[in-house]
Amino acid sequence: MDTSDGRQHDEHHHDARGADGSQTGPAARGLIVEEPEPRVVRAAIAGDLTALEGLIRAYQTPVWRFLRHLLGDEALAEDVTQETFLRLHQRLPSFTFRSKFSTWVFRAARNAGIDALRSRGRQERLLKALPPPRPAPGPDLRAEVQASLGSLSPKLREALLLVEVLGFTYREAGEVLRVPQGTVKSRVSQARERLAVWHARGGRAGAGPATRPRGGEAPGWRGGCRGEL
């Protein structure tokens, strides 16, 4: 089940517009993952390979992006993306339509990512290897954002990615992470604060408080990166 082709180009979604021309579709709040039609999911559950392949194509790129930032390793993210869709294929009959399909998919991706992090941690402890050096920020915004995400703990990183990059609401992100909505909101707030500290120090890690930039936002994060990483 190859998940590489979908990463070679960005998704292009046509947003629905109201009578006044305002956006009413997913892009109105930054969501880059659209919900499949229930009939397509039911067809995939029933064994329709064409429907299954369509679901994989729709989700492989956002899942890989989420895992790439969660794991900080593109090659590992590719392997875990493969593992995620293998798990989804095996467990598809257990989907009961009690939640959004996208929530179910990203919960599986998150669980597979956590398993990979734990496995990598065990290997590193066994080898007594030093942690890899944190990549220095590159000349462009995307490289800077990726480096700043690497300074966050996995719990803060995954919450921020779900809300800010994938456009999930706090409630939806809570369903993916299996934590209360308030916990997601707190983690996202902490992540923003730590990104602000990271930027205030010029991209250097360290302990202790730093002055929050005006407006309380981390420079270079909000307003220009959602759905583009």
Image (cartoon, rainbow, N blue to C red):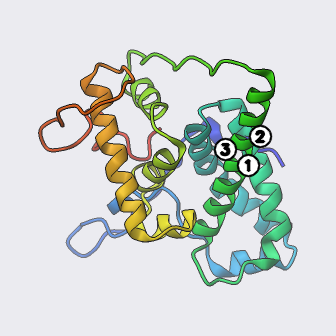
Instruction: Tell me the residue at 63%/39% (across/down).
Output: 7
Quick check: 40 above or below 34? below
Q: What's the distance in space between the residues labelled 3 and 1, CA to CA?
A: 24 Å
Select label 3 or label 1 by which is in front: 1
- Say if residue 218 shows up in the picture: yes
Q: Determine the secondary structure under disc 2.
A: helix
Instruction: Tell me the residue at 62%/44% (across/down).
Output: 67
Residue for badge 3: 6
Q: Determine the secondary structure under disc 3.
A: helix
Which of 44 and 93 lies nearest the eye of the viewer? 93
Q: What's the distance in space between the residues labelled 2 and 1, CA to CA?
A: 6 Å
Quick check: 117 above or below 171? above
Q: Residues within 10 Å of mark 3 (few under 14, many from 20)?
A: some
- Amino acid type at image mark 2: Ser
- Say if residue 26 shows up in the picture: no
Instruction: Tell me the residue at 72%/52% (across/down).
Output: 112
Q: Position of residue 105 (x, y in %)?
A: 65, 63
Residue for badge 2: 119
Select label 2 or label 3 by which is in front: 2
Mark on residue 199?
Answer: none
Residue for badge 1: 115
